[in-house]
Amino acid sequence: MAFPPARISLAVSVPQAVIKVAGRAAVERTRDFKAAVQNLAVIGVREIFIDLSECLLMDSMFSGMVANLAAGPDLRFTLVDANQRVTDLLANLGALELFRVAHAREGMPDLGPVKELPVTCYDKRATTECCLEAHRFLMELQQENKARFETLEKVLQAELDAPAPAEPMAPATAPALPSSSVCPAVAMP
């Protein structure tokens, strides 16, 4: 069963923000999440509540990036209503201890209306770099993760080290399409 990519929405009242992640938190939305958190930090947000009440599952890339952001000194993260599958994954990766965990929206502020973040298309190289960053963080976080992700790290690094393929010439009458972008097929309202 395929799950659609996550919908990410946020509400902000500096110094707090609520980020809701609904659906499958995976590679397609990792960079959008990272950019949102970085932008929130720039405007003075210091406490982020991640509402996972509708998050079905989380992949290792998304988990690694969220953990990497939570490990920084300037932001405090609280996971709210994460399901057992997500908390087990974070615990197995050694990342759960980086977060406060709350249930039944305990302590989560009502910051007013939420705004859904649009899906951004990133090229394959940018996505590979982000994936490598997330997995390297997990590898440093816990010894068991080194064995888990060592092969993936080598494959990703090899992709980054390889010369970029030449773009084929498109016929003059056909529009050129990006050949190496990662963008889910999601209809945005």
Image (tube, rainbow, N blue to C red):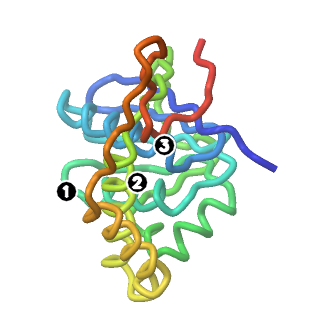
Distance of label 2 from label 3 (alpha carbons): 10 Å
For the residue pair 110 and 54, the one nearer the viewer reads as: 54
Disc 1 crowd rating (10 Å Cα; few below 14, some 14-19, many 20+) is few
User: Which picture quadrant has residue 85?
Assistant: bottom right
Residue position marked by numbered label 3 in the rendering: 50
Query: Would you say the residues marked 2 and 3 are in contact, meaning their CB atoms lie under 8 Å apart?
Result: yes
With respect to residue 73, does 93 lie above or below?
below
Badge 1 marks a residue whose secondary structure is: loop
The Cα atoms of the two marked residues, 3 and 1, are separated by 17 Å
Does label 1 or label 2 sit earlier along the sequence? 2
Q: Residue at x 57, y 35 (%)?
A: 184
Residue at the spot 44% in from the left edge and 21% down from the top edge? 171
Nearer to us: label 2 or label 3: 2
User: Do labels 1 and 2 touch, CB within 8 Å?
Assistant: no
Of residues 33 and 28, the one drawn nearer to the viewer in this rendering: 28
Dot 3: few (<14), some (14–19), or many (≥20) neighbours within 10 Å? many
User: Residue 104 at x, y = what percent?
Assistant: 65, 44
**Looking at the image, which is closer to me, 49 or 134?**
134
- Residue pointed to by mark 1: 73
- For the residue marked with disc 1, what is the amino acid? Pro
Q: Position of residue 103 (x, y in %)?
A: 61, 50
For marks 2 and 3, the one nearer the N-term is: 3
Which residue is label 2 attached to?
66
Q: Quadrant of residue 18?
A: top left
The circle drawn on residue 43 is none
Report crowding for label 2: few under 14, some 14 to 19, many 20 or more residues within 10 A (C-alpha): many
